[in-house]
Amino acid sequence: MVFMNKIITKILMAIILCSIMVSVSIGYLSILHASKILRQEAHDKFRYVSSNYANEFSVILKNIEGSVDTLASVVASSFDSNQFRVNQNYQSEYVKRMNDMLKEVVEKKNSIQGIYIIINPELTGQVFESWLINDGQGHFIHQKPEDISMFSQSNEDMAWYYEPINKKSGIWIPPYVDATINVKMISYTKAIFNNDNLLIGVAGIDLAFENIEKTIGNMKLYESGYSFLINTDLTILLHPYLETGTYLPDIKNEDLNNVIKSMTKNKSDVIKYVFKNEDKVMGFSKLSNGWILCVTTVSADILKPIDRLKNSIIVSVAFLLIITGIIGLFISRSITAPISRLRDMAALISQGQHNIELDLNSKNEIGELSKSIHIMTKKLVSSHEESKESETKFRALADTSPLAIYMSEGIEQKATYVNPTFIKLFGYTIDEVPTVDHWWPLAYPDPNYRKQVANEWQQKVEHAIETESEIEPMEVVITCKDGSKKDLSWGFITTGRHNWACGLNLTERKQAEKEKEKTIEKLRKSLEEINSLRGILPICAKCKNIRNDEGYYEQIESYIQKHSEAIFSHGLCPECSDELYGDKDWYVQMKKKKDSNLS
């Protein structure tokens, strides 16, 4: 029983329960890992399938191209244009020779729908050709020659003939339905030129598109997947939902633009995109003729096995949580009861009730924890009192300081305190300047002056940090909230995370200096004006009046006031006072009293 009452035992039991949750976490991580594997597997599968089928189709296309190139090469080297123009026997023999060449090719390639060599009708004014068509039973029959009236650049039905001539290279004709035999096929045609660059004719092979179409239609990865074929000019050749000839860039879809960029840049790729509000994954690979084979599916199909696994895990976890919840309820009550009591007591202590009685007699970990809390409470009380005393002293000092104090912390210099002097001096509260960044435009609204101050301040702060010294005081002019200007000298101290900016108001001193300068200037001007009275002034020897510029005499003080900024105040000197009032009793008594006070 003693062992079971130990906190460690209960913690161990809790750990056992937590291990169940850890198992669930591991299962969850396994799901994440499995999802990653499935995505990678899908990525590889899309790349492999598109590339593999593209290679298979490319082999077929290259074989066709090789056969046509061989026919063109043989004709170019063996054809005598001069003989063919004038010699009917040569014409017949060469047509027979072409028939033999075509038969030799079709015997080796049973997938051919049609094969032909057409001699340029401009050489003779007639149509000479050898054209074999598969009758659908594996037998090849001769096609009736085209009427010479069909041979015109403007005839769209003859594009298979004139396009390779214009490009002077072999071309692939996209899938089309032959009107004669009603068969969907693709064609490779190539213009034949001799060494003198004379057009001899055109050779080509028609390939039934049915097998390729079925293969592409059956290429399906995942439940909703499908495949499609795109031409080199990014038009649809084969698609289960889009019309043939649809130009991909015309489809308004930002993600398709990324797909098009990848198709333009890469030979093969696997790319994610959104089409018709569905997240999709597509792998594509280019065929030897430049056509693009694409395999795509909805992204959700890839992770469907994970969804089933998730459902199983959720059911298992839910059942396990019910069981562990019931067990944990009983265990947690026995563990948390004493801890809850300590928590409540600690809450009371944190609220300032330091006279709480703790159970110090328990022999288990709860008792040890109670003793630790008791010791901590004593230290907390002592520390709180010291901290409170320090804070009181600081507040008293800062609140009564004549300096404007802005205390901030952190690199962002977030304000934590501004003293009353700061608020009174500038008019801004801490809510109005919560950071230094808020202070700059308010204190220095002029952008040029703000930039100048900021640069100088930054240099001084960096120097102070590098030399671990106080910042050199910096004098600035600050715009207050009421629009008034104040001259200030800023100092800055940093103590790690905390920053102190202290400002001394120089406004009155600056104004006094300006007033002093004004007074000095005024006295200087007065002196200059007084000095301007130099020279001989006519003055009466008896009444002391001065003769002015008009020739009239006036009192000396009136004359000086007119010719200077001096103003006279009138009084009596001691001699004149004795002369006027010396026989008066009140004057005699006043004079005696004054003399006694001086003695």
Image (tube, grey):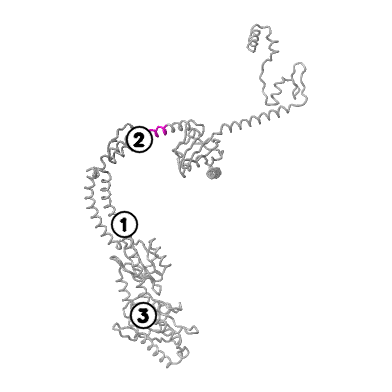
**Tag 2's secondary structure?**
helix
Tell me which label, 3 or 1, sits earlier in the chain.
Answer: 1
**Residue at 71% of width from left, 23% of height from top?**
559
Q: Is residue 448 above or below residue 69?
A: above
Mark 2: few, some, or many residues within 10 Å (few <14, many ≥20)? many
Whether residue 532 appears in this view of the structure is: yes
Residue 290 occupies quadrant: bottom left
Read off the residue under disc 1: 29
Mark 1: few, some, or many residues within 10 Å (few <14, many ≥20)? few
Residue 464 occupies quadrant: top right
Checking the image for residue 206, the label placed there is 3
Checking the image for residue 507, the label placed there is none
Query: Disc 1 to disc 2, how far (Cα)?
Result: 44 Å
What is the x, y in percent for residue 120? 44, 84
Checking the image for residue 377, the label placed there is 2
Name the kind of residue labelled 3 in the image: Asp
- Of the residues tagged 3 and 1, which is closer to the observer? 1
Q: Range of the magenta residues?
A: 379-388
Name the image quarter holding the N terminus: top left
**Tag 3's secondary structure?**
strand
Q: Is 380 within the magenta?
A: yes
Left or right: 361 as drawn, with respect to 167: left
Q: Is residue 32 above or below residue 447?
A: below
Q: Is residue 283 above or below residue 465?
A: below
Q: Is 382 within the magenta?
A: yes
